[in-house]
Image: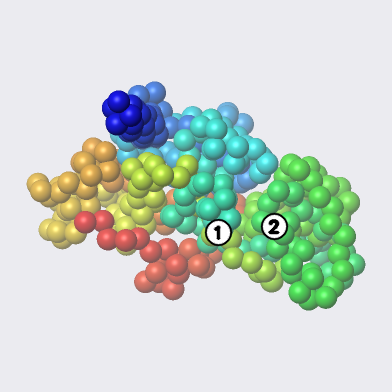
Amino acid sequence: MAKKILSTLIGAAVLGMGAQAASAGTLDDVKAKGFVQCGVNGSNLAGFGAQDSSGNWTGLDVDLCKGIAAAIFGDATKVKFTPLSAKDRFPALQSGEIDILARNTTWSASRDSQLGFDFRAINYYDGQGFMVRKDLGVNSALELNGASICVQSGTTTELNLADYFRANKIEFKPVVFEQQSEADAAYKAGRCDAYTTDASGLYSIRLKMDNPDDHVVLPEIISKEPLGPAVRGNDSKWFDVVSFTHYAMVTAEEFGITQANVEEMKKSENPDIKRFLGEEADSTIGADFGLPKDWAVQIIKAVGNYGEAFERNVGEGSPLKIKRGLNALWNKGGLQYAPPIR
């Protein structure tokens, strides 16, 4: 009798685990509801996540979400955006309010391990910097001894700031805000001598100033900030779809495939290109991911290759005019590198 009860309990546990696993598939959930719910920056961070006057979302992170929707549905409009603060972003992902967090978020060991998230694809290599008014007469962060510095709470930025000044044995006065918009307004109003956040963010915030040319980003980069999408842990199929959407954009740039020529490139004799674009008869890559065979074609049609998205949103074709730097392809001196899609 005891053996029978034990067997029943084990069977119930296995069934329970199976039901839990079945309900944990974000890709299946996304397909069922017909759209991707994407968490983005709620502070209108130009170049990464911002709304225009018509309510349309644009930015490098936004394009990643549109690319994911295109890969799944063949339609980049099948995505909804949830604007989030730094404080709200992690609970929103943990609770299932969003399917993916694409909010210029730094991949760190504690976020990967303690929060139960998975990171892999880095869509922007960044580092923390400082911005000051030119009339302050400061040319280096090391000259900010005793300065008041605006910083957002609940971020790696706040921790890096304290570490940097302690390591260099200089004093500072933190002026801490929960919302980025509050920190922006305080710096603009002159409540602090300097502003610190990711360098890409500083270029974006600089555009919000009445006279952007009156402000300068100092040369020091005091941290490593690999920014990329995060998903809930232990959901490998969804993790792959999110990661390989970015890798497909990088691979397209490597192959010279663009929004304008993707249909023509489907005729290429290069077997790697044919396989990547779903033109090889025996290619199962799309099916392996739970996606259509032309998933990469749909991404490129929707948002272009990585270089196109970069230039449009944050590069020379944008108001930010950030140089590629570390975000150039690996074969052009940068760090953007995609595993073989084969």
Circle 2 residue:
157
Q: Position of residue 251 (x, y in %)?
A: 32, 57
Question: At 76% from the left edge and 43% from the top edge, which residue is drawn?
Answer: 178
Specify whether residue 284 is in view: yes
The kind of residue tagged 2 is Thr
Question: At 36% from the left edge and 45% from the top edge, which residue is drawn?
Answer: 236
Question: At 53% from the left edge and 30% from the top edge, which residue is drawn?
Answer: 97
Locate residue 173: give its quadrant.
bottom right
| Classed neighbour count for the residue bearing mark 2: other residues with Cα under 10 Å, few (<14), some (14–19), many (≥20) | many
Foreground disc of the pair 1, 2: 1
Q: Position of residue 209 (x, y in %)?
A: 76, 49
Q: Residue furthest left?
A: 281
Q: Position of residue 167 (x, y in %)?
A: 76, 74
Question: At 37% from the left edge and 71% from the top edge, which residue is drawn?
Answer: 331
The kind of residue tagged 1 is Ala
Q: Is residue 55 left or right of residue 70?
A: right
Could you say whether the residue bearing mark 2 is in a helix, strand or loop? Answer: helix
Nearest to the observer: residue 26 or residue 321: 26
Q: Position of residue 25 (x, y in %)?
A: 37, 34
In the displayed structure, 187 sits above or below 135; it is above
Locate residue 23: give its quadrant.
top left
Circle 1 residue:
109
| Classed neighbour count for the residue bearing mark 1: other residues with Cα under 10 Å, few (<14), some (14–19), many (≥20) | few
Nearest to the observer: residue 32 or residue 187: 32
Could you say whether the residue bearing mark 1 is in a helix, strand or loop? Answer: helix
